[in-house]
């Protein structure tokens, strides 16, 4: 709204005293769309994308932490003695491994509200 208030020129003495509606444009023209319309479009695009960046970046960050914990190798080491697999990790305590690989409980009440 601020961009619209500043960019338009309505030639009304009552509001022009306050510096509102004293801009360069009297109508929606091609020049207005090139300058003001592009600014408004980019602002709306950023407003749509920015709330979701953290939700997309967090799983990537957790995956990177897991990879660094494993030394950027495969998750499991084959244990040929017992025919089982051992988790490759630098963590010492089981609680730390569980915190890294299990993660938090999904807050479905926020997602489905």
Image: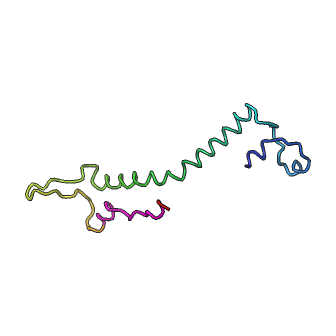
Q: Residue furthest top?
A: 30
Q: Residue 109 colored magenta?
A: yes
Left or right of 5 on screen, residue 60: left
Q: Main secondary structure of the magenta part?
A: helix
In this view, 40 is above or below 67? above
Left or right of 110 on screen, residue 87: left
In this view, 96 is above or below 53? below
Residue shown at 78%/42% (left/top)? 7
Q: Residue furthest right?
A: 13
Left or right of 87 on screen, residue 15: right
Residue shown at 67%/41% (left/top)? 39
Residue shown at 73%/45% (left/top)? 3
Residue 66 location, quadrant: bottom left
Query: Measured from the top left, where is residue 44 in percent x and y?
Result: 62, 46
User: Which of 77 and 4 lies nearest the eye of the viewer?
Assistant: 4
Query: Measured from the top left, where is residue 36 in percent x and y?
Result: 71, 39
Query: Measured from the top left, where is residue 41 in percent x and y?
Result: 64, 41
Left or right of 44 on screen, residue 51: left
Q: Residue 33 colored magenta?
A: no
Specify start and end residues of the magenta stretch as a single range: 96-110
């Amino acid at each position: 709204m601020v961009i619209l208030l500043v960019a338009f020129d309505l030639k009304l003495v009552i509001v022009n005293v306050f510096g509102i509606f004293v801009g360069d444009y009297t109508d929606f023209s091609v020049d207005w769309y090139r300058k003001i319309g592009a600014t408004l479009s980019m602002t709306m695009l950023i407003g749509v994308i920015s709330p979701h960046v953290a939700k997309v970046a967090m799983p990537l960050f957790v995956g990177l932490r897991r990879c660094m914990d494993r030394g950027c190798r495969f998750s499991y080491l084959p244990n040929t003695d017992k025919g089982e697999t051992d988790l490759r990790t630098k963590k010492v305590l089981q609680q730390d491994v569980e915190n890294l690989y299990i993660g938090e409980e999904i807050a479905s009440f926020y997602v489905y509200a």
